[in-house]
Amino acid sequence: LSAPNVWQSSIGNGMQVYGIKNSEVPLVQLNIDIAGGMLFDEKNKVGVANFVAEMMNKGTKHKTPQQLEQAINQLGASINVYANQESIKISANTLARNYQATIDLITEMLMEPRWDENEFSLAKQAIMSQIKQQQTNPRQLANNQMNKLLYGESHILSNNLLGTLASVKQISIADLQTFYKTKLSANLAKINIVGNIEKNTALAAFNDLGKNWLSTSARLPKLKAPALPSKSKIYFYDVPNAK
């Protein structure tokens, strides 16, 4: 087994970039990982991080959602912004020859979200519908309860990433804009690139992002380590003939 060679560098704003060249197919896959995610949510407005990620897929300052989707499709690419418990991620796949154009679209999505009121209302309805569907899904209900047992009721990660019907209902577009301006910071981000592309070419595509996306004062919150409730019990089972 031959481990791939991983190169490392940085762009103008100090964001770290890691890459692997793979020439088997003429494709490039990349991820921008911005630490934070639900860790930055307020307890009374859980769901903001997920909502911000949803809105970043809904067009840009210069492109409607339909125009953005068309621009991505014309490149034979895919770009998706999504949140998880500890980060907001931008994931993309593209043809190597369209790498620069794909990075330009990602830069536009990251630097100039549309914040359209109509799209905001539609996204809110869609998220609330997802929450209602989850309330009838035994597996999701079990996951929600497991998080509360793992982290404790007071820990932010004990909550559903989507939030609750009550929390999402009271989220405003101003809440999303505040989160975007203060929490999506270059100092919390890193880039991973794998594909048929040279290191210098991969880095040069991020020149505009390196110049225009600056760090804020955002720092990951310090949270207490989760602890088992005082009445919790741990059971160990002996499996006969197990190795």
Image: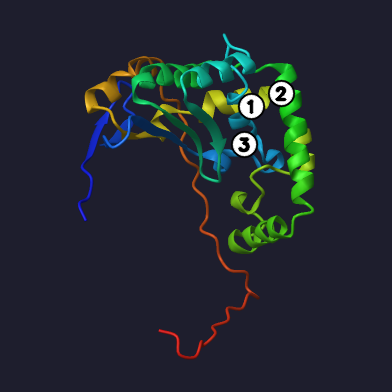
Is residue 136 depicted above or below 178 in this figure? below
Dot placed on the residue nearer the N-terminal end, 1 or 2:
2
Tell me the quarter of the picture where residue 5 sits: top left
Side of 5 relative to 66 (left or right): left
Marker disc for residue 176: 1
Q: Which amino acid, by three-letter code, is at mark 3? A: Asn
Residue corresponding to mark 3: 50
Residue corresponding to mark 2: 120
Classify mark 1: helix, strand or loop: helix
Would residue 204 be seen by someone viewing this image from the given angle?
A: yes
Instruction: Work out which quarter of the rendered image holds the N terminus and state it.
Output: bottom left
Foreground tag (1 vs 2) = 2
Classify mark 3: helix, strand or loop: helix
Q: Which amino acid, by three-letter code, is at mark 2? A: Phe
Side of 85 relative to 76 (left or right): right
Q: Which amino acid, by three-letter code, is at mark 1? A: Leu
Tell me the quarter of the picture where residue 94 sits: top left
Distance from Cα at disc 3 to Cα at disc 2: 13 Å
- x and y percentages locating residue 101 in the rendered image: 41, 16
List the single residue furthest toward the top.
62
Marker disc for residue 103: none
Dot placed on the residue nearer the N-terminal end, 3 or 2:
3
| Residue lying at 64% horizontally and 45% vertically, measured from the top left | 161
